Image (cartoon, rainbow, N blue to C red):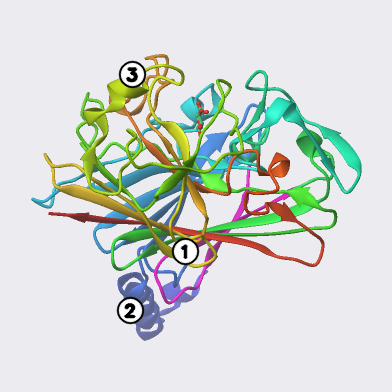
Amino acid sequence: MNAFANGAGPARAALWGCLLSLAVVAPPSAFGDVKGLSKMAYGETKDGEAVDLYTLKNGKITVKVATYGATIVSIGAPDRDGKVEEVTLGFDSLDGYLGEHPYFGATVGRVANRIAKGKFTLDGEAYSLAINNPPNALHGGVKGFNRVVWKAEPVESPDGPSVKMTYTSKDGEEGYPGNLATTVTFTVTADDALRIDYEATTDKATPINLSNHAYFNLAGGADATMLDHELTLAASKYTPVDDTLIPTGAIEPVEGTPLDFRKPTAIGARIAQMEGEPGGYDHNFVLDSGGGKLAFAARVHHPKTGRVVEMSTTEPGVQFYSGNFLDGTNVGKGGLVYKKHYGLCLEAQHFPDSIHHPNFPDAVLRPGETYTQTTVYKFSAR
Ligand code: BGC
């Protein structure tokens, strides 16, 4: 016999009342009190590792981040009429991310961008990396930070819903020295911005360069290139590259070249002049801020919808990549075939191949030091 069958009417009513009020006051989050944050199972890797998808909502934007590759899977942002649509490239389910793709939305590391010939010497010791972008090493290797499952925990933050992802890359992983403990925290703030804070420590000196590889197209899931988007870059200089996209070591002015985006300019306006290798823009811009403090780096405006994304970063450089190698192989969200120039990347970074260029800002982390990087993508419409 249970208590309710024993004439315990008032107790039952009180219990129901209590349950009901709990239901009413409970926030719409899987995490009790982290408002605007929810979590769902996203599937499994081929090795059977569980992957979760976190949704962060604040202001007018919604951001989805998967624990596989600490990947930005989706950003929904309003146009000038308030219509919220997808503004990043990617897939409708985990399967797409597990397959071959050019780093859609992924966290890239331990070293984003290229290391010439995949070889370097540090503190007298020679290291060899996989040549996954012949003849160079690219974006952390064959199984970079974009291909591992990160641990995630919700974070109490006064700024908005926040999820902290952690991954420890073992000494020797992908050829790099030192156990590297890494955290990447995604926060969506009330002013419609996604802030990404990176931190890392190591027990042996190692090159490091963490970034995010989101592809933006502010047209909102349209079957269209981003060549009509207007770009502003706060960079008077860039690092010219050889024909394998490795910097020559020079730092040259953008003035008088098609890389001068100091005033808002349609990306397509001069891209024809870049049609030799690499078939568009794929360059490291030297930010006028010099790095070290959070400062304005770039703005992209889509005149048709009015959408704007403004990027600030603590990094000294940004790789502006105009999606030159998108060739229709990847079928993405809603069945959209991603063709050349369908998305653009603004990757905050230290300069490519810094390990071979003493005149570039130092990109080596040593024991006892803490690497930090903050990049903000703020959305608006006009
Ligand atoms: C690189 C490109 C590369 C792309 C996708 C960008 O960061 O600069 O050269 O093709 O990533 O891998």
Classify mark 2: helix, strand or loop.
Answer: helix
Which label sits in the foreground, 1 or 3? 3
Q: Residue at x 30, y 72 (%)?
A: 24
Q: Is mark 1 within 8 Å of ligand 1?
A: no
Answer whether residue 226 is visible to the viewer in this image.
no
Residue 379: give x, y in percent of width and height.
27, 55
Q: Position of residue 117 (x, y in %)?
A: 72, 25
Q: Toward the viewer: 222 or 288? A: 288
Residue at 69% x, 29% y is 116
Label 1 and label 3: CA atoms lie apart by 33 Å
Q: CA distance from mark 1 to mark 2?
A: 32 Å
Tell me the tag on residue 17.
Answer: 2
C-beta proximity under 8 Å, tags 1 and 2: no
Q: Which residue is mark 1?
A: 162
- Magenta extent: 149-168
In this picture, residue 98 sits left or right of residue 377:
right
User: Image height check: is 69 above or below 59?
Assistant: above
What amino acid does circle 1 point to? Ser
Q: Main secondary structure of the magenta part?
A: strand
Q: Residue at x 46, y 69 (%)?
A: 32
Residue neighbourhood size for the residue with mark 1, other residues' Cα within 10 Å, grouped as few (<14), some (14–19), many (≥20): many
Tag of residue 339: 3
Q: Which residue type carries mark 3?
A: Lys
- Check if residue 165 falls in the magenta segment: yes
